[in-house]
Amino acid sequence: MLNLVKPEEIDFDNLGFAYIATKTMFWATHDGTKWTDGELRPFGTFEINPAACILNYGQGVFEGMKAQRTKQNELVLFRPLENAIRCKESCERLCIPPYDPQKFVYWVKQVVKANADYVPPYGKGALYIRPIIFGSGPILGVAPAPSYTMIIFVIPVGPYFKEGFNPIKLEISKKYHRAAPKGTGNIKYVGNYAGTMLPSEETHAAGFAQIIYLDAAEEKYIEEVGTANFFCVVDGILLTPQLGSILPGVTRKSVIELARDQLGMSVEERNVRYEEVFKASEVFCTGTAAVVTPIGSIMFEGKQYIFNDFKVGEITQKLYDLLTEIQLQERDDPYGWVENVND
Ligand SMILES: *Cc1c(COP(=O)(O)O)cnc(C)c1O
């Protein structure tokens, strides 16, 4: 079931975050010696050996980025080289031959251009870009695959804030951990995500949007929110968990820079104890999909902590505006973060 949809059949006013097949994907293979140049192909299914390393031992990584249409009808990407470099680092941790970051960015642009009709109109969402690299060759013993496949496909998605920019309710859980210290939490390893599905289902059933995971060693410090990085404002200082077992988000890194340079805030990347968060004036999380999402309340051990009266905080709003205006070329981009797909 490909569910191929023509661009003119898409209802761009009612897009969510669901699978839709688009026209064209990128395809490259590695034969154990080197990557092929790669090519654009019609989006479609492919055959795979049952003994493929990805199926048996999960040797695979992914990335997540987006292309947006500006008011001037240009198609732009946000810091694509950051994703390309992170992908290389993810590959290295899993003994996957890394793909050249410059070529990665080149092919991301080609895939977006080939699917330009699927990029939602200005303000109606984005074209979500999903690069994947996995051990497709057969192997029986636990060892790196003899060969690899890389694919980049794209799916149009709606705006994250359909009903406006509203704070979400979260829950701190001690029932599950996301990532072990010195494990694979810091890379976009496919195996990190299946284990978060049951915790997500349970927290949804309890009325929360997501779980906030604590550090697995001591259960004292905030790690992150499912698929978004965590921030809070305490006594005017922006706090965010230091890198380690969390995923080094491109949005996280950008928000830290914006808070320091544009808002003149002090930002501390360090262990953030969960008790500190309870007295925060603002709390939010960041990611490619989540952008900057305000957190209105956090439930912990039967008690609900509410932030800024469940309203969007001033700093959260400013960071959201700065980030989205830069992303859509509606304000100066002093960092050169935004790239046109035709560049
Ligand atoms: C992708 C991801 C993020 C956000 O990273 P961005 O680069 O900002 O999109 C945060 N946490 C996890 C676990 C992720 O997989």
Image (cartoon, rainbow, N blue to C red):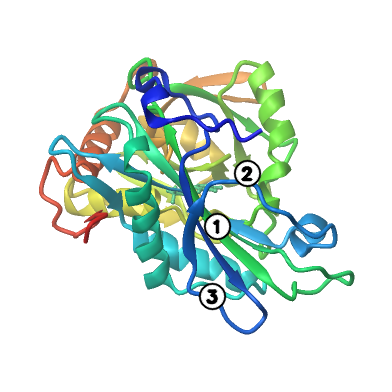
Q: In the image, 31: left or right of 248?
A: right
Report how far apart the C-alphas of labels 1 and 2 lie in the structure: 33 Å
The quadrant in which residue 331 appears is: top left
Nearest the viewer among 299 and 43 is 43
Residue at the spot x=55%, y=54% of the render? 246
Q: Do the residues labelled 3 and 1 touch (CB within 8 Å)?
A: no
Confirm or deny contact between disc 1 and disc 2 (CB under 8 A). Answer: no
Q: In this view, does 332 lie to the left or right of 281?
A: left
Residue type of the residue flagged with mark 2: Leu
Q: Residues under labels 3 and 1: Cα distance?
A: 12 Å
Label 2 element class: strand
At horizontal 25% and vertical 45% (from top left) the residue drawn is 75
Spatial distance from mark 3 to mark 2, Cα to Cα? 41 Å
Residue tagged 1: 151
Circle 1: element type: strand
SS for tag 3?
Answer: loop
Residue under pointer 2? 214
Look at 27% across and 52% down and name the residue there.
266
- Say how many tags the image has: 3
Q: Which of marks 3 and 2 is nearer the N terminus?
A: 3
- Label 3: which residue? 36
Q: In which quarter of the image is the N terminus?
A: top right
